[in-house]
Image (cartoon, rainbow, N blue to C red):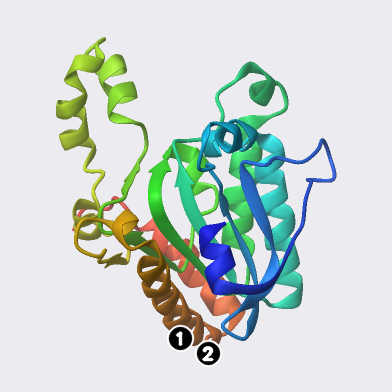
Amino acid sequence: MNYVRRLVQDFTPLAGDRVFGEDAALIGGLGRFRGRSCVIMGQEKGHDTTTRIHHNFGMAKPEGYRKSQRLMALAHQFKLPIITLVDTAGAYPGVEAEERGQSEAIAKSIESCLRAETPLISVIIGEGGSGGAIAIAVADRIFMLEHSIYSVISPEGCASILWRSAEFSHDAARALKLTARDLKQLGVIDMIIEEPMGGAHREPERTIDIVGDYIEKAVIELNAIDGHILKTRRRQKFLEMGHAV
């Protein structure tokens, strides 16, 4: 919400998935980004114990990802750019989430990203974890803050699977190549956004403004491209990931 409050005017949140209920872990709605109407969404972790519990530490349940589908369908219908801000350790792994179709909701959200015939820009602003992150990050342009991480699994989770012990989390982190520099080299992200000296938390408002500049440039560039071409290029971009050069 810090990003929304600083970058988006007249933000109108759209709550609920029209199936089960509202998910406070994923916030999204309509607004004007630097004079342009847009759809914006992202995970909200909260800033203290009370708000973190309310937002489930940014770990969305199926209703959150069904909300994202609803928002992307709205953007597609009205030809509005989609801006997503990723900051989650992953989708919520609880029993109730699985009972309500967590994996299906994530898969459908990814499909919605690939169907949208409108510019889609995603920024990893802190932590991008597993399917919970990529569900809203299958984008035309993927930016990443310099000190953020983006990975299929946490180092601790990876270590517990491969070595049966979280003590090997440092080895797992190196193998996962979860840093912005590694991911740029691998072609998973498009650009690294440099943070102020000492990290984004030292100058949060300046960081948000810099992120806004990157988003604005991408929106202008992508708005000039036909929607069907955007969709085709986006699909091809992700199909080519992982191919040997």
Q: Can you name the residue that lies furthest to the bottom here?
A: 224
Is 204 displayed left or right of 85 in the figure? left
Which residue position is annotated with label 2? 224
Q: Nearer the viewer, residue 83 or 241?
A: 83
Is 129 displayed left or right of 167 in the figure? right
Which residue position is annotated with label 1? 221
Give the residue at x 29% y 58%. Answer: 202
Q: Position of residue 245 (x, y in %)?
A: 18, 58
Q: Can you name the residue that lies furthest to the right here?
A: 18
Q: Secondary structure at mark 1?
A: helix
Give the residue at x 52% y 42%. Answer: 45
Q: Crowding near pointer 2: few (<14 within 10 Å), some, many (20+)? A: few
Q: Nearer the viewer, residue 27 or 230?
A: 27
Which amino acid type is shown beneath numbered disc 2?
Answer: Ala
Q: Position of residue 85 (x, y in %)?
A: 50, 57
Which amino acid type is shown beneath numbered disc 1?
Answer: Glu
